[in-house]
Image: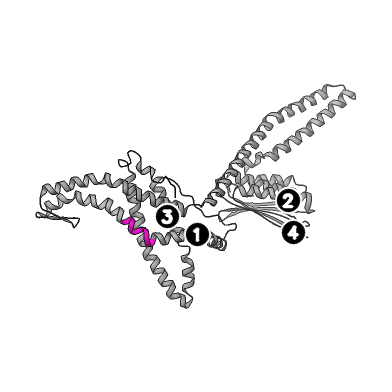
Amino acid sequence: MDKDWWRPVLRPGFARSAAPWRAAGYLLVTGLTGLLLCAGLLVSVVAGGALAVLLVGLPLLAALALVGLPVAAWERRLARFLDGGRVPDPHRVPDRPGLAAWLRLRYRERATWRELGFTALAGFVLWPVDLAVAGCALAVPGYLLATLPLLLLDGEQVNVLKLWQVRSPWVAGLFGLAGLALPPLLAYPVGLVAAARAALVRVLLGPGGQDRRIGELVSSRARLVDAFEAERRRIERDLHDGAQQRLVALRMTLGLARMDAPPEGPLADRLTAAHREAGEVLAELRELINGIHPQVLTDRGLPEACADAADRSPVPVTTRFALSARFPAPVESAGYFAVSEALANVAKHSGASAATVEGRYADGRLTIEVADDGRGGADPGRGTGLTGLADRVAVVHGTLAVSSPPGGPTLVRVDIPCAPTGTGVER
């Protein structure tokens, strides 16, 4: 638990702000949620235990292990309502789509069992405390303020909090004044209880220490890759707008000079050779720029960029994409370079006569497959570039799978969880 969780409650002006009311509302909602959760857990456990004799209740008892997931998601949202601080979700994204992969991962995660323990704690221990504190904070001042109106309506007496019998309007007025003075005094204990409960939520339902370190490493790597991508684009832009334009101008100047030079002379031959050399350098520079970051990827999207890479492959490649939307730039970049590296391996190592590139989006995942009819035997550990490609895909939380038995065929599959960002074109 954060050792400074109590500091916001003791800051100046806390009692005059809206924070105490948020704290009381937070405890009221968590108390009512815990009460309902207590009833639901008791009914489910009793029903599952009774039906377990007939084996019907076993799935119900197994499903109870996952009841902490929605409860924890609700608690994280409530903690954010209290102080505005987001509680990160500790769960990982499954490597494969489908319910089976999701269930297998959830049952193996420590976070699932921590959430189940917190659910039991909230359902059987915390909710009476939450309701008691919230009730005192909201009901007691209201009851004291209502003492005088209730006495005037009754005409004889009123029982204040079932402790005092009040018959005098003056005494009832004093209770009303106490009701006005009580909320600022109750603000601090209510705020401390709510802050302590939210801190407990952050400890038990947020990422653990190791998970936080892993998340920080992933975020750091993602920032480095973003910086690298930005630098790549800057270099590509400088080469495209600077060196390439100057080479084009130089080639045109050499062409004009060759036309003005005397024909069949040594000067014409040298100008012709220089003109040809400038053209070759310009072609190489364009290939370099395209390898740094193809402009077609930015302008037209992943299907067109992969089709362009397929056209430049010495092996015949067929592309089929069913993408109706654009995706975040890092995702499209990772997908494009995965296809480029896979096609380069096809040309260098596979001995294939044909290859295919297919892309689709379903269940929140972008899937790209590159297949060839070559000799197979591709091994990511032998320096074919697949290891670096797997690292690039991992930065965007994707996975790379390679199937390449001896004799072929070879299939490289990239799965990247992502959400569309705009309209695209199927190809």
> Mark 4 or mark 2, which is nearer to you?
4
Q: Amino acid at mark 4?
A: Pro
User: Can you say whether 380 is above or below 4 in the image?
Assistant: below
- Please provide percent x and percent y for residue 244: 71, 31
Look at the image and say whether residue 97 sits in the magenta stretch: no
First of labels 2, 3 by sequence position: 3
Considering only order in the chain, which callout, 1 or 3, is on the residue closer to the N terminus? Answer: 3
What is the three-letter code of the residue carrying label 1? Thr
Figure check: 355 above or below 104: above
Front position among marks 2 and 3: 3
Marking on residue 112 = 1
Q: Residues within 10 Å of mark 4 (few under 14, many from 20)?
A: some
Earlier in the chain: of badge 4 and badge 2, it is 2
Q: Nearer the viewer, residue 397 or 171?
A: 171
Give the side of residue 96 with respect to residue 153, left or right. Answer: right
Mark 1 or 2, nearer chain start: 1
Residue 256 at x, y = what percent? 79, 24
The reply to whether residue 148 is visible in this rendering is yes
**N-terminal of the two: label 4 or label 1?**
1
Q: Residues within 10 Å of mark 1 (few under 14, many from 20)?
A: many
Kindly report which numbered mark, 3 or 4, lies closer to the viewer in this rendering: 3
Say if mark 4 contacts mark 1, CB within 8 Å.
Answer: no
Is there CB contact under 8 Å for labels 1 and 2?
A: no
Depth check, front residue: 410 or 379: 379
Badge 3 amino acid: Trp
